[in-house]
C-alpha cells in the first residue's frame, strides 16, 4: 500500500476498505485479550515477573490503539459525509447497528438471564446487577471513575465502550460545526486537555483508576486519531505528518522508557503512566497507523497486517472484546481445578498455558458464531442508512488495499 496519487495518505473512508486497518484492529484486540487472560496468573502483578508476563502487562495499551483507530475512521467518515442529506441520521444509525445489538445482548445475558436461571449467581454478576443503570446507559466509565477503578464492580471492560459511545454522540456535531482547520485545532486542544487534566488531578490526589476511566482525561487516542484523519486527507498536511511522525514516535518511546523506569511496571494505574503514559501510547499508536498507511503492499509491515489471521481478529474484534472476559472468568477456576492432578508434570505455568489456549479458542469460536449468526444479519440493515455513493464507487480502482 502507498499514498494515493495526489499525495494524501488516504482517499475515502466510505468508499474504500483499508485491509491493513483490520489487521491493526486485530493487533489491538489480541493485546487486550491476552492482558485479561493473563490477569489471574499468580505472578502477573509482580514487578519482577518474567519477560512474557511483563509483555502481557502492556496489553491494556490495545484499548488506546482502538481509540486511535476509532478517532481516525470516524472522523474521516464524518468529514466525507457531513454535506450529505441525513448526515446525522445515517451516521448514528450505522453506529447503533454496529454497537448496540451485541452490547445489549451481552448485558441481557450477564445481568438478566444468567442471574435468573442460576440458583446462586456469581457475586461479580450480582455487583453488575445492583449497578446496572450505568451499563444500560453507556456510562459505565463514570461508575468506575467514581469508585476509583475496577476493584469494586465487575464488568470493567465496558468502560471503553462507554467512552466511545459518548464520542459517537458528540463528535458528529463538532465535525458538522467546524472547518477542517478548526477541527484540527480542537482535536489538538482535546489532546492537551487530557494530558493537562491528568497532571493537575494526580497532584490533587485523584486516583489513577479514576484518571484512566473518565472521558475527558482519556481522550488522547481519539484526539490523535482525529488529527491523523484530517491530515491524511490533505497532500500538504500528509507530507508534513510523514516528516513529523518519526520524531514524535521516538520522543514518545523514550518517554515510555523513562516512565517504565520510574514506575517499575507497565500497568495503567501506576502514577507516571497514568499521568503521561496515555499520551505517549496514543502518539506511538498514531505513528504505527501512519506507517501502515504508507507501507508498500510488498513490505513486511503490510504483509503482517493483511495476513488472514490478523484481519480475521479485526473482523471479529467486537465480539471477542465482549466475550473473552466472561469466558476467562468462568474457565480459570474450572480449568485449574481440573488440571490440578497434572500439576507435578505440567507445573503451574503449564496448567496456565492450557487455560490460555482453551479460553482463547472458546472466545474465538463464540466470536465467529456471533458474527455469522447475529452481527452479520444486523449489519445488513445498514442499507437503510447508506451514504450517498455517486459514480457507483468508480473511484475504488485507485484505492489502496481494498477488498473486492
Image (cartoon, rainbow, N blue to C red):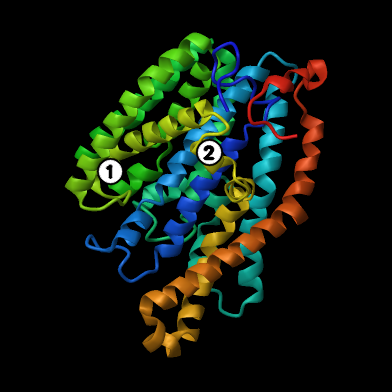
Residue 323, quarter of picture:
bottom right
Q: Residue drawn at (60%, 80%), measured in percent from left and top?
A: 119
The mark that comes first in sequence, 2 or 1, is 2
- Residue 47, picture quadrant: bottom left
Circle 2 — which element?
Answer: helix
Position of residue 303 relative to residue 120, above or below, is above
Q: Quadrant of the N terminus?
A: top right
The residue at the point 73 percent across, 22 percent down is 397
> Camera-side residue: 266 or 164?
266
Q: Position of residue 199 (x, y in %)?
A: 24, 34
Task: Give the foreground label among 2 and 1.
Answer: 1
Local secondary structure at mark 1: helix
Q: Is residue 396 visible?
A: yes
Dividing the image into 4 quarters, which one contains the C terminus? top right
**Residue 219 visible here:** no
Is 149 positioned to the left or the right of 31 in the image?
left
Q: Is residue 93 left or right of residue 169?
A: right
How many residues crowd around disc 1 within 10 Å: few (fewer than 14), some, or many (20 or more)? many
The image position of residue 9, as x and y in percent, is: 54, 20
What residue is drawn where x is 72% and y is 49%?
375
**Residue nearer the viewer, 239 or 179:** 239
- The residue that label 2 is drawn on is 164
Residue denoted by label 1: 273
Q: Tell me, for residue 307, which label it has, or none.
A: none
Amino acid at each position: 500500500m502507498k499514498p494515493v496519487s495526489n499525495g494524501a495518505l488516504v482517499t475515502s473512508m466510505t468508499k474504500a476498505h483499508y485491509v491493513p486497518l483490520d489487521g491493526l484492529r486485530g493487533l489491538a484486540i489480541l493485546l487486550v485479550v491476552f492482558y485479561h487472560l493473563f490477569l489471574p496468573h499468580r505472578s502477573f502483578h509482580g514487578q519482577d515477573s518474567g519477560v512474557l508476563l511483563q509483555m502481557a502487562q502492556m496489553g491494556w495499551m490495545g484499548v488506546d490503539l482502538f481509540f486511535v483507530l476509532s478517532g481516525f475512521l470516524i472522523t474521516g467518515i464524518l468529514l466525507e459525509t457531513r454535506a450529505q442529506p441525513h448526515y446525522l441520521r445515517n451516521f448514528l444509525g450505522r453506529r447503533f447497528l454496529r454497537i448496540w445489538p451485541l452490547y445489549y445482548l451481552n448485558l441481557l445475558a450477564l445481568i438478566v438471564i444468567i442471574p435468573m436461571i442460576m440458583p446462586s449467581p456469581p457475586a461479580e454478576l450480582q455487583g453488575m446487577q445492583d449497578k446496572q443503570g450505568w451499563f444500560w446507559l453507556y456510562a459505565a466509565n463514570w461508575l468506575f471513575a467514581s469508585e476509583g477503578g475496577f476493584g469494586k464492580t465487575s464488568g470493567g471492560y465496558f468502560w471503553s465502550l462507554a467512552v466511545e459511545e459518548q464520542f459517537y454522540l458528540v463528535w458528529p456535531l463538532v465535525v458538522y460545526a467546524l472547518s477542517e482547520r478548526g477541527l484540527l485545532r480542537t482535536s489538538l486542544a482535546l489532546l492537551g486537555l487530557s494530558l493537562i487534566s491528568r497532571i493537575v488531578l494526580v497532584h490533587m490526589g485523584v486516583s489513577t483508576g479514576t484518571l484512566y476511566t473518565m472521558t475527558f482525561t482519556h481522550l488522547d487516542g481519539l484526539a490523535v486519531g482525529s488529527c491523523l484523519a484530517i491530515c491524511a486527507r490533505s497532500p500538504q498536511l500528509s507530507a508534513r505528518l510523514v516528516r513529523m511522525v518519526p520524531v514524535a514516535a521516538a520522543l514518545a518511546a523514550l518517554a515510555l522508557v523513562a516512565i517504565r523506569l520510574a514506575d517499575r511496571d507497565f500497568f495503567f494505574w501506576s502514577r507516571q503512566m497514568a499521568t503521561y503514559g496515555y499520551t505517549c501510547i496514543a502518539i506511538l499508536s498514531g505513528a504505527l497507523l501512519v506507517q501502515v498507511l504508507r507501507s508498500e503492499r510488498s513490505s513486511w509491515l503490510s504483509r503482517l497486517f493483511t495476513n488472514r489471521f490478523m484481519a480475521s481478529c479485526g473482523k471479529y474484534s467486537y465480539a471477542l472484546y465482549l466475550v473473552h472476559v466472561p469466558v476467562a472468568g468462568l474457565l480459570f477456576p474450572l480449568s485449574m481445578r481440573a488440571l490440578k492432578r497434572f500439576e507435578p508434570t505440567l507445573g503451574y505455568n503449564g496448567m496456565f498455558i492450557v487455560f490460555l489456549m482453551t479460553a482463547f479458542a472458546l472466545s474465538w469460536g463464540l466470536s465467529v458464531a456471533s458474527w455469522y449468526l447475529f452481527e452479520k444479519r444486523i449489519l445488513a440493515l445498514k442499507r437503510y442508512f447508506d451514504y450517498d455513493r455517486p459514480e457507483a464507487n468508480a473511484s475504488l480502482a485507485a484505492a489502496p488495499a481494498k477488498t473486492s
